[in-house]
Amino acid sequence: MFFSHKRSNIPPLSSVKLAPEMRQIQAIQTQLDRIESLITAPLSIEKLALDASMSYWHFQRTFTAMVGEPVGRYIRRRRIAHAAMRLLDYESTLLDLALDYQFESHEAFTRAFKNELSVTPSDWREGRGSILYPRHREHLTQAKLDQRYKNMRLLPEIVSLPSTTFAGLQSRFLSATSDEANNMTVIPNLWNAFFERASELQNLTEGVYYGLSENPEAINLARQHPDEAIYLAAAQVDPDAPVPEGMHSWNSVGGLFAKFEHQGPVDTLGETIAYIYGKWFPESEYKEREGPDINRFGPRFIPQSENSLFEIFVPISS
């Protein structure tokens, strides 16, 4: 069974020599520099991820963890910063700046500018926002990441797991890396719907459930939003077990996983995810491989309790 995993022969992380070149930090910094050099050009997050040799999903989470905000928000704020400086030279109209920095209209530019700096572009130009500071250009260093995660020490167990089948209800959602994130609404509602139907699944292990997240393309669905992912609220089932109507089954390919434990309320999960992608992955010798992330919820999971605990399994390769 999935939860009776075996330890691999990989040495403990304390004995692993960290990569001196810090490949992921350099990969993200390269894309930060690319954003800066192409700030007036159309920018595709998919292309940035490809250039960083990461999946879209992994790039989004790694960027957010290292930089402190999602890719799209960082790009928009840097465009506003550049536009704010150009406003002071009086050589460009507001419409010119809006179009130069990839805003659809003067109105869209004005809204974004005011959301960022709390004044309109016209007020900024007249000096009524001069004490405000636009989003600075980011320069990543190991020291910055060490400072950001100085109070977190999450050393995972590296485990080998067999291929496993899960069945349950799935839904599209916008992850926490999106400006339009709805994960904290969609996912709880999905679990409520799943528990109403969980008894339809055969041979369940009572009190043990799994949450899986994956890219739409990985399960042959068309992406409807750039920041979209698919979540499955599920239980482990036999590979040949019938899947009730309206439910879906996913297969997790066996292999190596990094098993982390998240302790605390579920709404602090973002801090753990940020640590995994912003601190642990860059310093480890492992890479994320294809496959869904898997959360295992057992008897100790109490969503809003400080003592709540559940496990996070991230597929990795050495």
Image (cartoon, helix red, strand yellow):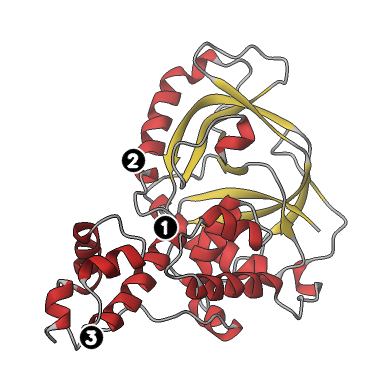
The residue lying toward the viewer, choosing from 203 and 189, is 189
Q: Position of residue 78 (x, y in %)?
A: 38, 73
Vertical comparison of 280 with 251: above or below: below
Q: Is residue 3 left or right of residue 15?
A: left
The kind of residue on which mark 3 rests is Leu
- At label 1, counting other C-alpha atoms closer than 10 Å, the crowd grade (few under 14, some 14-19, many 20 or more) is few
Q: How many marks?
A: 3
The residue wearing badge 1 is 268
The residue lying toward the viewer, choosing from 130 and 70, is 130
Name the residue: 60% across, 14% down.
Answer: 243
Q: Position of residue 76 (x, y in %)?
A: 36, 65
SS for callout 2: helix
The residue wearing badge 2 is 185
Q: Which mark is residue 88?
A: 3
Name the residue: 24% across, 80% down.
Answer: 87
The kind of residue on which mark 1 rests is Thr
The kind of residue on which mark 2 rests is Thr
